[in-house]
Image: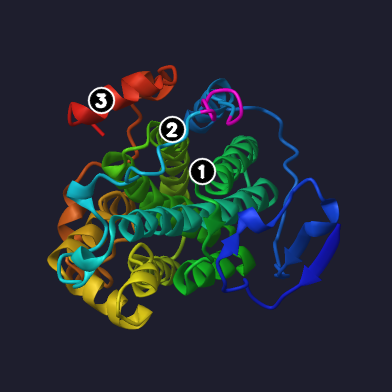
């Protein structure tokens, strides 16, 4: 296998159809190096406290699903049908020209939009995989190390699932947005383990949870909905772990250390809020530059609602762990998301709900159409 070192992720769209995976010489390993001053620790006290983290670890083991066997990959959504329900199409009405496209072009654009979104999910999942593996080393307590190990395997499955869908069902993949990439760089290379926790378990995963739920609701493809549903169940566990673990730890920090983390969390939120609007796809099909399309999309009522919706999980969790300080609260107010602080956080665990067996595709479909995405 060939290996190539790069300074940043290649910015072109990867077309899988041009690569024959049977030919090993055709596969190139493209690596970008990051250095991390990770401070790891052994834990020599093997007394296992039977706490919530241990219970979450047990659940993680019990609920291992298999991307290869538990999803029916023989299903392929018909090429002449939209992947996204057109009542919820991802292009805002303010973008003009969509109606002039041929049906073929509109179907192609639909594929590109789903690909762009799933590509962001895929890269975010790789980030989560790398961070979770760091947490095994640097989380201080025994149960947290064990939990992080089980999360690492969950994240591997998520990378596998999104990658497989993109490869087999769509055929091409987009690079990560600058915002997502820079946040992953920051989290992976910071030496403070709790900052990794805040960045990954609360911000990136909280946002992913809202984005996955939204995506699951607007899709037409049963296979992709099922994949997202299974990933969502894992992510809910990860966010719950983050909130439960951080709440106690952050109380031990000084006021200035807390403000430092609160400011980091806010900045991470700002970086991520533009993550799920793609000017790039619109500019491929319509007469806009990516920046123009991004700007219009971000400022429409639909775009703003969507960005705000992404904070429904993050804000109550930040409040719960003590990072919605008086100093940063006005900044969230400016983003229009402070009212979410009153929503339910992920601290209290509905064990029965979290432990239920994985639903079938039909059950997932029924729950979505019943208004319970
Ligand atoms: Fe994940
Ligand atoms: Fe996760």
Q: Residue 325 carries which label?
A: none
Secondary-structure class at tag 1: helix
- Mark 1 surroundings: few (<14), some (14-19) or many (≥20) residues within 10 A: some
Q: Does the magenta stretch include residue 72?
A: yes
Q: Which of marks 3 and 1 is nearer the N terminus?
A: 1
Location of residue 269 in the rendering, given as x and y in whole percent from the top left corner:
36, 66
Marks 2 and 1: in contact by CB < 8 Å? yes
The residue beneath circle 2 is 223
In terms of depth relative to the viewer, which is nearer, 318 or 311? 311
Instruction: Using the rendered view, name the quadrant where residue 255 is placed.
Output: bottom left
Secondary-structure class at tag 3: helix
Marks 3 and 2: which is nearer the front?
2
The residue beneath circle 3 is 367
- The alpha-carbon separation of the residues under discs 1 and 2 comes to 10 Å
Q: In this view, does 358 lie above or below 16?
A: above
Q: Give the range drawn in magenta.
A: 67-74
Marks 1 and 2: which is nearer the front?
1
């Amino acid at each position: 296998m060939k290996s190539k070192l790069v300074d940043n992720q290649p910015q072109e769209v990867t077309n899988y159809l041009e690569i024959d995976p049977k030919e090993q010489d055709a596969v190139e390993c493209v690596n970008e190096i990051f250095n991390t001053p990770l401070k790891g620790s052994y834990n020599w006290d093997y007394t296992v406290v039977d706490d919530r983290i241990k219970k979450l670890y047990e659940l993680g083991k019990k609920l291992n699903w298999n991307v290869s066997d538990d999803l029916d990959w023989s299903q392929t959504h018909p090429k002449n049908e939209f992947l996204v329900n057109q009542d919820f199409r991802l292009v805002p009405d303010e973008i003009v020209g969509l109606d002039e496209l041929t049906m073929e072009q509109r179907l192609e654009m639909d594929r590109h939009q789903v690909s762009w979104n799933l590509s962001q999910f895929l890269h975010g999942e790789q980030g989560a995989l790398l961070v979770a593996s760091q947490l095994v080393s640097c989380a201080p307590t025994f149960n947290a190390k064990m939990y992080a190990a089980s999360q690492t395997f969950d994240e591997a499955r998520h990378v596998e699932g999104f990658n497989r869908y993109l490869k087999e069902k769509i055929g091409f993949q987009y690079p990560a947005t600058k915002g997502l990439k820079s946040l992953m760089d920051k989290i992976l290379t910071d030496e403070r383990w709790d900052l990794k926790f805040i960045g990954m378990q609360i911000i990136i995963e909280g946002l992913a949870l809202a984005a996955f739920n939204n995506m699951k609701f607007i899709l037409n493809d049963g296979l992709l909905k099922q994949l997202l549903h299974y990933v969502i169940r894992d992510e809910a566990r990860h966010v719950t772990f983050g909130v439960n673990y951080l709440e106690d730890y952050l109380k031990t920090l000084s006021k200035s250390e807390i403000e430092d983390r609160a400011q980091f969390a806010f900045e991470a939120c700002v970086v991520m809020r533009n993550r799920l609007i793609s000017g790039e796809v619109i500019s491929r099909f319509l007469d806009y530059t990516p920046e123009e399309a991004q700007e219009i999309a971000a400022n429409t009522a639909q775009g703003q609602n969507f960005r705000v919706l992404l904070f429904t999980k993050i804000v109550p969790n930040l409040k719960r762990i003590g990072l919605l300080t008086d100093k940063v609260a006005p900044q969230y107010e400016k983003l229009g998301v402070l009212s979410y602080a009153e929503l339910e956080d992920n601290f209290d665990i509905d064990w029965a709900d979290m432990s239920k067996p994985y639903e079938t595709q039909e059950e997932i479909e029924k729950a979505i159409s019943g208004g319970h995405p």
